[in-house]
Amino acid sequence: TTIQLDRHTVKLGLAGKAELLEDINGELDLEQIIAMHQQGLFQPFTVAQSNRGVTRSHYWLAFTLVNESDEPLTWVLTPETSYLDDLTLYTRSQQDDWQRHVRSDHDVFNQRDQQYRLLNVRYSQAPQSTVQAYLKLSNRTLETVSIQGYVSEQGAFTDHLIEENLLFGIYYGLFFGMTLFAFALWRYSGVRKSPYFGYFFVYLSLSMLMWASLNGFSFQFLWPQHPWLFNQSFHIIYLGVAIFSFQFSRYLLNTPTLLPKIDKALLGLIAIYLLAIPLRLLGFYDLVLYISFFSLLSMTIQPLLGWMCYQRGNQYVVFYIIAWIPYSISLFASLISATSEWSTFGMSTLNMSQLAVLFECFMLVLAMLAKMKHSSHKLQAEAELSMIDSLTQLKNRRYIEQCSAQLAEQVESGVEYWLLLIDLDDFKQINDKHGHVVGDQVLQELATILKNECRSVDVAARWGGEEFVIITNVINQRMALIIAERIRRTFAKQVSQANGNQVPHTLSIGLAKWDAAGNQTFSHCFEQADQALYHAKQNGRNQVVSYHAELANEQIVTPVQK
Ligand SMILES: Nc1nc2c(ncn2[C@@H]2O[C@H](COP(=O)(O)OP(=O)(O)OP(=O)(O)O)[C@@H](O)[C@H]2O)c(=O)[nH]1
């Protein structure tokens, strides 16, 4: 049970080098402890005994520190956990009197010997000397207890701190970088109304706060003057982390729609966690401690939630599932370590969790990106669907309006568009004679002809009722007339069949050149095509009429062979 110190001693664990005594009621004083030690009531302290679970017990560690060098040596003693309430160290050098060093996380930060995130005692040991020590670790309330302690030579400890701070600097730098990136994503990508971003930010902030509390940085940087804030708030922070992680998941995964029953259960859990917050403020400490640990434990079901949503077709949640797996495993291990005596991992699981939460948040940002991409595809698909005519599966009038505006913007000089306005002849009679269903069938047959007669670069659409539109960019009027004439003839030849009856039909076409490059508006061109169509109807139907300037005054239209 002796600890040999030298200039290179860094974080030398007391396990294996100390003896342990549990003081269940915390009533024993130094005299009694010394007597019990002499009676052999202490037992060897091993790593396996460091996790004590949730307890009110106080613990004593007895050990001896030896400085064999010819120089004085200053050492620093630190505990395992940041949230230890009280640390009392009794030391006796050679035959001197016993000295008592009392440290508490209820004291303001700058009272600490070493400005370090964990409580500590600094002690200068004379050359060639032996120091006998009893270390008492205790909490003022029910708490998860891990009783390891570490001794370091001060110079070596300072070097170690440089490394540790660098690592934590990188860690928090990555966290803040990610927060900024997520914020920029939210601010500039048009998803400002998506609630999952809001929940993500709160979850991220609370997670950082929770881990800053658990690793002790909160005492150093967040509330150095008000350490009581930690003891009053940490269960509420746990609850907040759980509440916001579930809210984030509900919105990201869309559980209300995909998993309605499970979603109700999640809402139930959230309600319990919310209720626990005022209970804690009212003083129900022990109950809320267990609820808050349970809330963290319940978070580990989230990869499963992701998996269930994935199976129901939410393919974009893959990143979400990957995000949660390492964090769930390490959170689970941390909780087992903290609340039971089974695990020998000690607090290394907390370090694992800290790394895992960084990875998790990074993957959750990717998950949100994936969701945004998915949503924009869905919106695009919906937008496309809203521009399709359901009866004929041709594009509809809305599409033509949008597409003509785009064509007008992008048109290059020298490109000519031609507009064909197609209208069935006496369609009302077809409906009246054969019924609406047959009328629909005729419209569908015409749509098929238009699809076949158009090239992929042309646009064919149903303008409304029994009127159709084609925009084509053939090189001259002759080509446009050929296409129009081919459509007219094919439709006239193809007699429809309905209930054993033949349904003959014809159509008329008004043709107009759309001088988009010359700033002619589409609606102006449409009017001209409409005038041409009017003349075709006036002139006996079943024909193509091409618009020209004198048309409005002419009685005779341009006939095309029937
Ligand atoms: N079956 C069916 N009929 C439709 C649809 N949309 C419009 N109609 C009918 O199309 C007919 C158009 O009639 P009118 O505007 O008088 O034109 P028309 O009978 O074709 O005469 P002209 O155009 O002058 O040759 C009306 O009876 C509408 O009810 C549809 O989606 N399905």
Image (cartoon, rainbow, N blue to C red):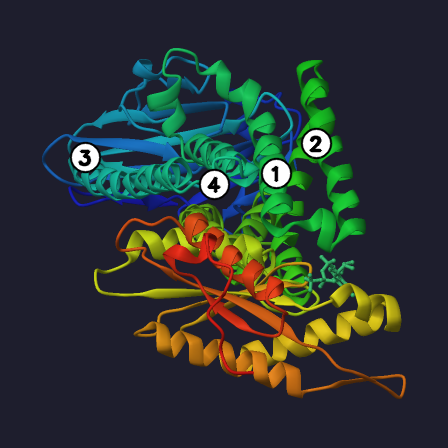
User: Which is more toward the observer, 401 or 306?
Assistant: 401
Q: Nearer the viewer, mark 4 or mark 2?
A: 4
Q: Residue at x 32, y 19 (%)?
A: 112
State the quadrant of the C terminus: bottom right
Is 135 drawn above or below residue 256 in the view shown?
above
Q: How far is the residue under mark 3 from the one under mark 1?
A: 36 Å
Query: Of callouts 2 and 3, which one flags the residue occurring earlier in the amino acid sequence?
Result: 3
Q: CA distance from mark 4 to mark 2?
A: 29 Å
Distance between the alpha carbons at the discs numbered 1 and 4: 24 Å
Residue 536 point in image, percent of width and height: 56, 66
Dot 1 or dot 2: first in sequence order is 1
Q: Position of residue 305 (x, y in %)?
A: 66, 56
Which residue is tagged 4? 191
Number of residues whose C-alpha sits closer than 10 Å to that of mark 2, classed few (under 14), some (14–19) or many (20 or more): many
Residue 242 has which mark? 1
Residue marked by disc 2:
273
Pinpoint residue 104: horizontal percent, then vertical percent: 44, 19
Q: Which of pointers 4 and 3 indicates the residue nearer the eye?
A: 4
Q: Residue at x 55, y 78 (%)?
A: 451
Sequence order check, earlier mark of 3 and 1:
3
- Which amino acid type is marked by label 1? Ala
Q: What amino acid is found at the position of numbered circle 3 in the picture?
A: Thr
The residue carrying mark 4 has its beta carbon less than 8 Å from ligand 1: no
Residue 367 in view in this figure: no
Name the residue that disc number 3 marks: 158
Q: Earlier in the sequence, mark 4 or mark 2?
A: 4
Query: Tags 1 and 2 in contact by the CB under 8 Å rule?
Result: yes
